[in-house]
Image (cartoon, helix red, strand yellow):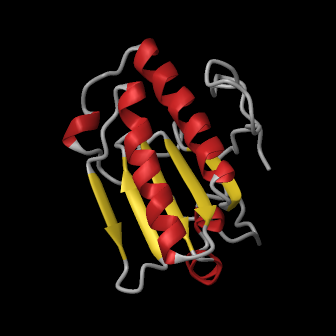
Amino acid sequence: MTPPSDEPTRPTLRISPSPHRLERRSGTDQQRTGKFVIDAARLMSDSHCQEVIICDLRELSDLTDYLLIGSGTSDRQMSSVGDDLDQLAPQFDLSCYGRESDSRSTWIVLDFIDVMVHLFEPASRAHYDLEMLWGDAPRVPWRKGDSSSEGAPGPQRSRG
């Protein structure tokens, strides 16, 4: 029997997958999703979103593969970025299955099944603190300006 530890245990969040995720996806689908999330991060950054991060949830969640988070400067800008992401998705054979926002448009979420995008105003982002909630998730490195064929997330992932 293991002696009790002074460190608090972290609860594990497990959510049932959507029916769209029950099928096993091919390696090509996974590569396409990885390229989409990188291009989506670049689009957000090019559209003046700040602190854009990608969390790799493939080993942590049955709900989605990637969580893309960025801070916007206004409800109009965030709405425009959401529209741009919706237009980018078909290039990668993806569709937006849902789009929601709070009553004041301080938070917009787009559901691409394998990628969940959260656009926040900075105060709402700090309040919900999804980076802390998914603190165990490796961060996917990406850079502005690279072509979408490079930098897709692979087996080697970085934390931090």
How many labels sit on residues?
A: 0
Q: Pick out the residue farthest to the left.
A: 19
Task: Please identify the quarter of the rendering in which residue 148 is found.
Answer: top right
Vertical order, 111 against 76 (above or below): above
Is residue 144 in sight in this rendering?
yes
Is residue 55 in sight in this rendering?
no
Percent coordinates x, y for residue 47 in the rendering: 63, 55
**Residue drawn at the location 34% of the way across and 26% of the way down:** 93
Percent coordinates x, y for residue 155 in the rendering: 65, 22
Relative horizontal placement of residue 65, taking residue 121 as reference (left or right): left
**Residue drawn at the location 50% of the way across and 57% of the way down:** 81
In the image shown, does 126 or 120 lie closer to the viewer?
120
Relative horizontal placement of residue 150, taking residue 94 as reference (left or right): right
**Residue drawn at the location 65% of the way across and 67% of the way down:** 132
Percent coordinates x, y for residue 74 in the rendering: 56, 76
Vertical order, 152 against 138 (above or below): above
Task: Please identify the quarter of the rendering in which residue 127 is found.
Answer: bottom right
In the image shown, does 76 or 127 lie closer to the viewer?
76
Vertical order, 5 against 112 (above or below): below
Percent coordinates x, y for residue 115 in the rendering: 45, 43
**Residue drawn at the location 62% of the way across and 18% of the way down:** 149
Task: Please identify the quarter of the rendering in which residue 39 is found.
Answer: top right
Relative horizontal placement of residue 160, taking residue 86 as reference (left or right): right
Relative horizontal placement of residue 66, taking residue 87 as reference (left or right): right
